[in-house]
Image: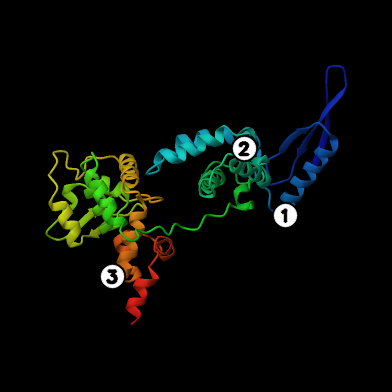
Amino acid sequence: MATITPRKDQDGNVIGYQVHVRKRGYPTQTKTFRRKRDAEAWARLIESEMERGLWRDRSESESTTLEECIQRYLAEVTPGKKNGHPEELRLRQWLRRPIAKRFMSAIRGRDVAETIKDMEGEGKSGNTIRLHLAVLSHLFKVARTEWGMEAISNPVEAVRKPKLPQGRERRLIVDEEARLLEACRQDENPDILSIVQFAIETAMRRAEICGLRWENVNLAGRVALLPDTKNGNARRVPLSSAAVAVLAALPRRLDGLVWDVKADTVTQVFARCCERAGIKDLHFHDLRHEATSRLFEKGFNPMEVSAITGHKTLQMLKRYTHLRAEDLAKRMG
């Protein structure tokens, strides 16, 4: 049963209304409102939820802001993730937004939708916005399941997500491969030529190539072990004769790495080589597209290709695979 008591100042003027809701089996709920009708509406809601067995304690979510939850998430959750730096950057951007000042219980889908509009106005891509929404969604999940905020809903689930652009279909055409390799030969960076050749042969990611160690390379068995990949699983990559030739020609380094180059440096040098070769709109990651497509064109089936490339699902594999109709026509007879 609810009781509503006027709250008065020292002059006897009513400045608010305090509600007490008491029901056997539930802790007493207390909240103060400026208007009596708001107090009555809240009391009816709490009583109704208790009668139907739907009541959840809102005290934690009503007294904790999104900003406080983000700080806690950064301290407790992000450090346990394999690569938490990108996530940390996204969360710190959420901290700078007005929504961060709101209490967790008060955040609704429309608040998130307004933030999405702000991000679009800032020029963020659909994929970037989706990544920001993903970390916010997980924060709400953790708050509900681990931080005692069972009563809150996840506002991210209530909004329409930006559409993702169609996957890139960029592949090497005509004489681009020859021009690219020649530009790499002329570059001042001694590693870029072998890295590009190796990428085209193996479909390995940039970070996987840069982190490859000699102790994980078996030239005789023609296999490279990747103990730490993007999806968290180790992977054994079979090496073509051309890939083996690339590795066999390299000197052995004292630090055990196959190449002495950082991933970001590869991107910068690759862009320079493309400019020198007169090749437009080609990214280093497109070489993974190219290599994956070539595996299909050689006759490998989807399961075999996924074992080589490390794609977890066939849908992900399809996004990275674009076969040339001309090459497929030759196989049709």
| Quadrant holding the N terminus | top right
- For label 3, the crowd category at 10 Å Cα-Cα, with few meaning under 14, some 14 to 19 and many 20 or more, is few
At label 3, the amino acid type is Lys
Q: Position of residue 176 (x, y in %)?
A: 32, 56
| Quadrant holding the C terminus | bottom left
In this figure, which residue is indicated by the disc labeled 1? 52
In this figure, which residue is indicated by the disc labeled 3? 298
In depth, the one of 71 and 87 nearer the eye is 87
In depth, the one of 245 and 43 nearer the eye is 245
Residue drawn at 74 percent across, 52 percent down = 51
In this figure, which residue is indicated by the disc labeled 2? 60
Q: Position of residue 207 (x, y in %)?
A: 31, 46
Label total for image: 3
Separation (CA) of disc 1 from disc 3: 63 Å
- For label 1, the crowd category at 10 Å Cα-Cα, with few meaning under 14, some 14 to 19 and many 20 or more, is few
- Could you tell which of marks 1 and 3 lies nearer the N-terminus? 1
